[in-house]
Image: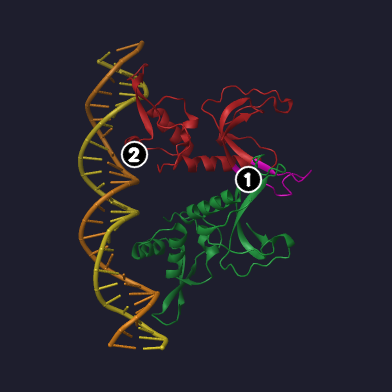
Chain colours: A red, B green, C yellow, D orange
DNA sequence: CCAAAAGTGTTTTAAATACACCCATGC
DNA sequence: GCATGGGTGTATTTAAAACACTTTTGG
């Protein structure tokens, strides 16, 4: 599922429903049922919104979230947990990378989200063997050895046993 | 989470939230948002309800469900999928067995839900090695060789990599 | 020629799989 | 003593993990 987020100005984000929170006591003022979604975007860009209520929105490192209202930090935990888990058996990462990227970028994404070091050679072997990525003829040039560019074989949700 | 199901008369069932369905077109008469849950019980027992709307409720094999209203068959698919998947990394099965059971019952449950044959020796070795079950001194007597009885080491939700 | 990131193989270890016979009981 | 379901071990295959050096480029 894809959609727009009016409070942040993010467009066409991959959306994944996480959980529905309906505990009567979660909001003291009223019984509010909230259906929490996680949005994945490759580039955070600028937080832009026309909604007056949400001006001053900013991005935070997930490891350094400020105190959030209601049970919203529980929602954030759910989101991170779901993302970590889905990295392991789906191609969900295509929503978090540009259309083309180097293998190092791909690996760094995994390492960062899973919050653990990854053995470059073992990881590379497994990923390339499962044909999750397509190697492109182009290379990224820069100050060092040129890096091969890759893109996802399919940029639509699929399950692939990966980790 | 545990709760009662007023439409079926089931009490203290393990409940797991599956998904929230909110597509405006799912009910032509009104925009209804439904939060779907799966309930697990060890013994289906009798379907009993005081709700007039649900008299005549029955149990069905999941492989032979009748046509259901709205998107309810999608919900049933979600439930089965979630159950299959959670069998593999949690002790969720304790909700589907009596307090004590033979290893054969345990294995049959897995084989039935996963809908594939299981190698008895390999399965046994793995399950017993992870200390998911407690072997009881008692045995079940019957027409054949007495079978050792087991119970779950913990009858509360926990994650354990199993399959 | 140096710094920096990209790229590559082999050995060891652990886990999954495949597979068939003996055992204990009630009748 | 026989029918029935309970219980056990080993060899093979496959996958995961550990591990370090060479290559290519720009400056």
- Please check the rendered image and state whether residue A28 is part of the magenta-colored stretch, yes or no: yes
Where is mark 2, residue-wise?
A126
Image location (x, y in percent) of residue A145: 32, 20
Q: Which range is magenta? A: A18-35
Which SS type dominates the magenta stretch?
loop
Residue A2, picture quadrant: top right
Q: CA distance from mark 2 to mark 1?
A: 35 Å
The vertical placement of D4 against B134, above or below, is below
Where is mark 1, residue-wise?
B20
Residue A124, picture quadrant: top left
Neighbour class for label 2 at 10 Å: few (<14), some, many (≥20)? few
Image location (x, y in percent) of residue A96: 49, 30
Chain on which label 2 sits: A
Which image quadrant: the N terminus of chain B?
bottom right
The vertical placement of A132 against B43, above or below, is above
Q: How many marks?
A: 2
Tag 2, which secondary structure?
Answer: helix
Which image quadrant: the C terminus of chain B?
bottom left
Residue A62, picture quadrant: top right
Image location (x, y in percent) of residue B132: 46, 62
- Please check the rendered image and state whether residue A131 is part of the magenta-colored stretch, yes or no: no
Neighbour class for label 1 at 10 Å: few (<14), some, many (≥20)? some
Question: Would residue B67 be found to the left or right of residue D4 on screen?
Answer: right
Q: Which mark is residue B60?
A: none
Question: Would residue A53 be found to the left or right of residue C6 on screen?
Answer: right
Q: Nearer the viewer, residue A58 or B3?
A: B3
Q: Nearer the viewer, residue B73 or B130?
A: B73
Task: Give the residue furthest to the front.
Answer: B67
Tag 1, which secondary structure?
Answer: strand
Name the residue: 63% across, 70% down: B46
Name the residue: 36% across, 16% down: A143
């Amino acid at each position: 599922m894809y959609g727009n987020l009016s409070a942040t100005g993010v467009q066409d984000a991959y959306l994944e429903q996480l959980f529905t929170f309906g505990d009567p006591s979660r909001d003291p003022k009223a019984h509010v049922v909230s259906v929490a979604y996680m949005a994945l975007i490759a580039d955070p860009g600028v937080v832009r919104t026309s909604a007056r209520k949400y001006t001053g929105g900013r991005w935070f490192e997930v490891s350094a979230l400020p105190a959030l209202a209601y049970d919203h930090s529980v929602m954030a935990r759910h989101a991170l947990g779901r993302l970590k888990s889905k990295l392991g058996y789906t191609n969900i990462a295509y929503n978090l990378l540009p259309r083309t990227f180097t293998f190092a970028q791909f690996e760094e994404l995994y390492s960062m989200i899973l919050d653990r070091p990854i053995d470059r050679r073992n990881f590379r072997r497994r990923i390339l063997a499962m044909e999750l990525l397509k190697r492109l003829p182009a290379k990224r040039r820069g100050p060092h050895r040129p890096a091969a560019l890759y893109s996802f074989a399919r940029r639509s949700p699929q399950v692939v046993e990966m980790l």
